[in-house]
Image: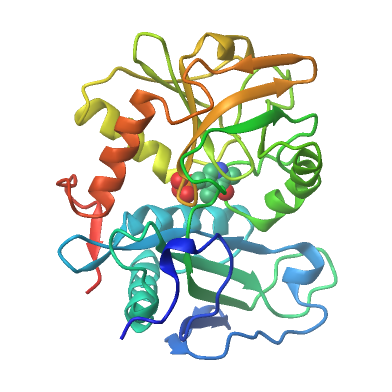
Amino acid sequence: MKKDLDWSSLGFGYIATDYRYSSKFKDGAWDEGQLITDSMITLSECAGVFQYAQTIFEGLKAYSTKDGHIVCFRPDLNAARMADSAKRLEMPVFPEDRFIDAVCQVVKANQDWVPPYGSGATLYIRPYMMGTNPVIGVKPANEYEFRVFATPVGPYFKGGAKPIVIKVSDFDRAAPHGTGHIKAGLNYAMSLHAIVTAHEEGFAENMYLDPESRTKVEETGGANFIFITKDGTLVTPKSDSILPSITRRSIMYVAEHYLGMKVEHRPVYFDEVKDFAECGLCGTAAVISPVGRIVNHDTVIDIPAGMEEMGPVTKKLYDTLTGIQMGSIEAPEGWIKKIC
Ligand SMILES: *Cc1c(COP(=O)(O)O)cnc(C)c1O
């Protein structure tokens, strides 16, 4: 039986669900892994995760479809990206097929927590991995734990589809070690001061520029940018130091193959931003959140689509993508993993 939650008023917060998955890596091998009920983790004070931030994560969602199934969206891409993150931080790769299996096990075991179709809420799934044994000299840990938990969530930004106001951050987004393209806690730790500063000044998010020249648009703390030109082309920044968003890659495909749009994936200069008709942030958590205004000190760029609602092209992309995710629009081959 579904849990007794007020699904449509959920925010983006943590609610402990009944089951999570754990697998441990020791002596060069992963154990079998299992579902467990304990949400707490007890580790050495000297664990690699605490001392040298050796930790990575992923984020994906499970959806209730129109016809009563529970599915998740392109988990193979999360598995592959987590493998890339692991390699960059000298962590063992959790096998990609086992990653997908662990996600499915956690969703299935927590199916009473999956928000119903049409509620606007979804089950957010958080796979993550950390170095667990004591490490004091600077080197990678040799024992790890891979975990997956799930928590029901509502919209990432308060107000849902209302456009947000963001600022151009004076800070660089990521740790300056070429790690911007991986999903790791260290990048988020480095962005916390910037996000707190932006919030204090009344902005919902930051637009980070490339740290080298500060002329090119990178991304926000947890979402990629999409722009729509006045003649309806989708433009999205290309950079080695932004996270390869699965939502953004899916939107590029949907724009081209479902909506017949022209798509450009290329460096985007901040100077161009004033000429775009629509702007949005895209990621698993935000889906597509429209941006209405971008402030860079004394310069204010008002996006023509305005502050009232999503621009028309962004809305079409949003409706098509969420239609595919929730089963009302046929998905490209291999995009939807049916769980139960
Ligand atoms: C997770 C994340 C995104 C969004 O990626 P999705 O795969 O679409 O969820 C964008 N930027 C950063 C920095 C991220 O960590």
**Picture layout, residue 334 above or below residue 231:** below
Task: Point out residue 184 in the picture as x, y percentages from the top left corner.
Answer: 63, 55
Q: Is residue 88 visible?
A: yes
Q: Residue at x 21, y 52 (%)?
A: 334
Task: Point out residue 64 in the picture as x, y percentages from the top left corner.
Answer: 28, 65
Instruction: Give the quadrant of the C terminus.
Output: bottom left
Q: Residue 103's image quarter?
A: bottom left
Q: Residue at x 50, y 75 (%)?
A: 149
Task: Point out residue 3 in the picture as x, y percentages from the top left corner.
Answer: 40, 82
**Picture layout, residue 73 above or below residue 230:** below
Task: Point out residue 223 in the picture as x, y percentages from the top left corner.
Answer: 54, 41
Q: Residue at x 49, y 31 (%)?
A: 280
Instruction: Give the quadrant of the N terminus.
Output: bottom left
**Picture layout, residue 116 above or below residue 271:** below
Q: Residue furthest toward the bottom?
A: 37
Q: How many numbered circles are shown?
A: 0
Q: Residue at x 49, y 46 (%)?
A: 160
Q: Residue 99's image quarter?
A: bottom left
Query: Does residue 292 appear to the left or right of 329 in the view shown?
Result: right
Q: Is residue 182 visible?
A: no
Query: Does residue 282 appear to the left or right of 50 in the view shown?
Result: left
